[in-house]
Amino acid sequence: MRRFHSIIFWSLLFVGFVWGVAFGTDMSPGIYTLKNLITSTAYMAYGIALGLFWPTCYVSLANFLHSRLGKSGDFFLEQAKSVQKDLIVASITALLLALIYCLDAVEYNFSGIDIAFVGVPFLVSAFYTYIECWQIKVAGKPIRKIVALVLLGGILIMTISAITLLIKNSSSELSVECSIFLQISVILCGLQFFLGGTILLYCLSKQQARFPPFIKHFFSAVVMSPTGLTARVASGMEDTNRMWRKQKSENATAFRKKQKTNSKQSARKQR
């Protein structure tokens, strides 16, 4: 399976990157003025960013299947079970939509927004999930807000940009190639944020920092990270777990002391 995952990952990275560059080039107004240059650069960067979701979403989906089959332990099995309903409903919706278009006598011209809107609920759900993460307290203390802020900002930017471009597509301003790339990318982007958000929320709700074994294996054995980022993140999570255990122990000790103090005060009052 290692070679299979490697071929799929690099193939999706190549297709996503090349198609993303083509998307940015097609959408660009040119580089003849400063305004046009800035707009063209933004479209190019956005196209490449969308293209990167193609391979990363594959890894997230493979991780979900790996967890759902019980190959990542009980912790991630329960997490996968908690989101499988949403994925099944979305898959059935997409299949029904495809069936309708196959049976429809009218030729589909890709100037709509219906395909992409299979992924929009995932973006909305992910946004709400990260808001829930914001509100969680671990060991009696609120989590660091910077991570949630970055993720919320990323989802917001991607969602607003995607909807703006989908409006253009609905007005037949995008070519067929750009429309297909945009709509597929919106689905993959939504899935990526959704799957990542649900894992984060589950870990925080259980007050355990866990790194999915499949993703750790993937970026250390299948597609090696040249910077060793995966290993550093996994190591950082172990440090976080130790810190959380220490904080929970300190909180438990403080709570017991408080109970003893209250009991003594109550006993004195009764005397």
Image (cartoon, rainbow, N blue to C red):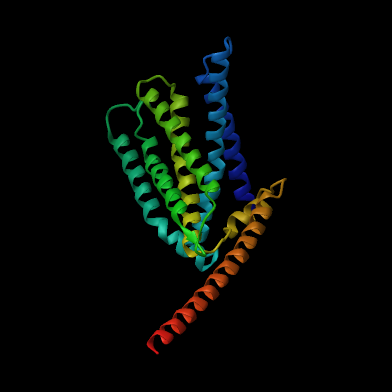
Determine the residue located farthest toward the bottom in the rendered image: 271
Q: Which residue corresponds to the image point at 32% horizontal and 39% vertical from the top-left?
A: 97
Q: Nearer the viewer, residue 149 or 3?
A: 149
Q: Position of residue 59 (x, y in %)?
A: 55, 49
Residue 19 makes an appearance in the image: no
Residue 146 makes an appearance in the image: yes
Among the 4 quarters of the image, the one containing residue 162 = top left
Q: Position of residue 270 (x, y in %)?
A: 38, 87
Among the 4 quarters of the image, the one containing residue 266 = bottom left
Q: Position of residue 171 (x, y in %)?
A: 35, 21
On the picture, is 100 further left or further right than 2? left
Q: Nearer the viewer, residue 94 or 239?
A: 239
Quarter of the image with the N terminus is bottom right
Q: Which residue corresponds to the image point at 69% horizontal and 47% vertical from the top-left?
A: 225
Compared with 269, 71 (above or below) is: above
Q: Nearer the viewer, residue 124 or 248?
A: 248
Q: Nearer the viewer, residue 192 or 138?
A: 138
On the picture, is 177 further left or further right than 239? left
Determine the residue located farthest toward the top in the rendered image: 32
Q: Which residue corresponds to the image point at 27% horizontal and 33% vertical from the top-left?
A: 104
Quarter of the image with the C terminus is bottom left
Q: Which residue corresponds to the image point at 69% horizontal and 49% vertical from the top-left?
A: 224
